[in-house]
Image (cartoon, helix red, strand yellow):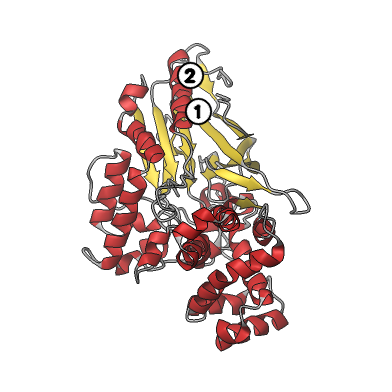
Amino acid sequence: MPWTSSFTQETMIVVLSDIHFTEAQSTRLGSRRFNRNIEPQIFRSYFAELNDFAVNNGIPSIDLVLAGDILEINRSALWLEGNQRPYVANQQVEPGSPVENAILRILDAIAVEKRVKTTLSMFHNLSKIFSVPVTVHYILGNHDRLVNATPATRARARELLGLGNSPEIFPHHVLLNDSNGLPFCLVRHGHEYNSDNFSIKTEHLPEIPIEFPESVYGAPSLGDIMSVEFGAGLPYFFSRYYGEEAIQKDKKLFALYKRLIEFDDVRPASALLSFLFSTPGVKKRKTWALVKPCFMKIIDSLKHNTAFKEHIRQSSVLSPLKKVFLMGALKLGVVKVAANYGVVKQIMKLVSRKIKLTSQAAWAQKESVIQSEDSSVRCVVSGHTHTPEVALIATHQGEERYYLNTGTWRNYIPATPDFRHFGHLQAITKVIIFRPSENPQQRKKSGWSFYFSSADTFGNHRFF
């Protein structure tokens, strides 16, 4: 086993986030599908590893926390096939409405993908995979926010994940107790720390409360707009402009289409345009000529979006001159500015800022349960950034308190320092936490502990 524990009789907490189960229906070309979901065998191997450890070390039970962005509802081009968009508040979604139907359609499209379907079947059969009881907790992130919109959307999500039947809304955090019933571990998605993906700005708060009102969690953010208009919009409009048959027959069009599908997997996000303009077999000038109509379509849509224009005014990454330039371009419309590359470059600078998320340790440090010296909470766990991290955030009376970021279970595209070359890696982060408990063998209280492992894998070889 790659990890061991010296303690016995401890309940184990396992946290997974940012799996982004995604539909592939809207990106297909003819009979060809582009499935960006990871292989089910990855989950099967990990669950088997967890079960072996639990059995061999006398672990009585497991809390499995799915910490948000599990079901990718936002970034789907299915939204673009109608007049509905995901940047609507949950409270505004009526049962039986077109928006609810769009959410349910996307959930159904996610569920039928072969890899997703096989993986979800494991969540329905955890009792057959594990020899100890497993309790599943599902909290929502910014990409699966709309799961909470209506009773029907909540029921469908519960059905997909094998969580039974309940009309209750999904929570936004889990506060797990120790063996004495005291709060021990706070798990949230982490978009609360990032105002571009949360409906209110939290950076100026003296401390972050455990929970915000449901209306705050249910409201859309600017990141929702970016996910749809650029992440889903670029390949969608490219396919509609050139046609599926033409793209499949033309090597340059096909290479660019594949690039656009992978657009939001690029890291760092500041390399987005470089990734597009380094498409193998397509020169930069030709690339711009081919993708220009797609950017024209998106920019023309954004000029009517008041939230996007307000973000330009408040942006800290654009100089006053560039703000005037962009607002003027949007006001004139892309037909008059001819989709000037400078306009696109500055807008993409804003887009990359939404994806470029730095360490969240400073925000976790502001958690009310961490700032209080009397608090029994020893760790804060979140995801959201797709960047795994371990950070010491406080010590009180000799007790260390840590922040753990769960990273992601996704494919991602790294760039060389000069942004000229790009690769393809798969990210896996394991976060396992052991509560403090009585250790019968040692006849004393065992301190809490955690196991954290983050790895990038390349190729098809099974590493675990």
Please say whether residue 170 is visible from this viewpoint: no
Q: Amino acid at mark 1?
A: Pro
Element at badge 2? helix
Q: Which mark is residue 53?
A: 2
User: Which quadrant of the figure contains the C terminus?
Assistant: top right
Relative to the observer, which residue lies in front, 26 or 244? Answer: 244
Element at badge 1? loop
Which residue is at 47% across, 33% downward? 14
Q: Amino acid at mark 2?
A: Phe
Q: Earlier in the sequence, mark 1 or mark 2?
A: 2
Which residue is at 34% across, 25% downward? 133
Q: Is residue 142 above or below residue 1?
A: below
Location of residue 29 in the rendering, given as x and y in whole percent from the top left corner: 44, 53
Residue neighbourhood size for the residue with mark 2, other residues' Cα within 10 Å, grouped as few (<14), some (14–19), many (≥20) = some
Q: Is residue 238 above or below residue 396?
A: below
Relative to the observer, which residue lies in front, 176 or 412? Answer: 412
Residue that badge 1 annotates: 436
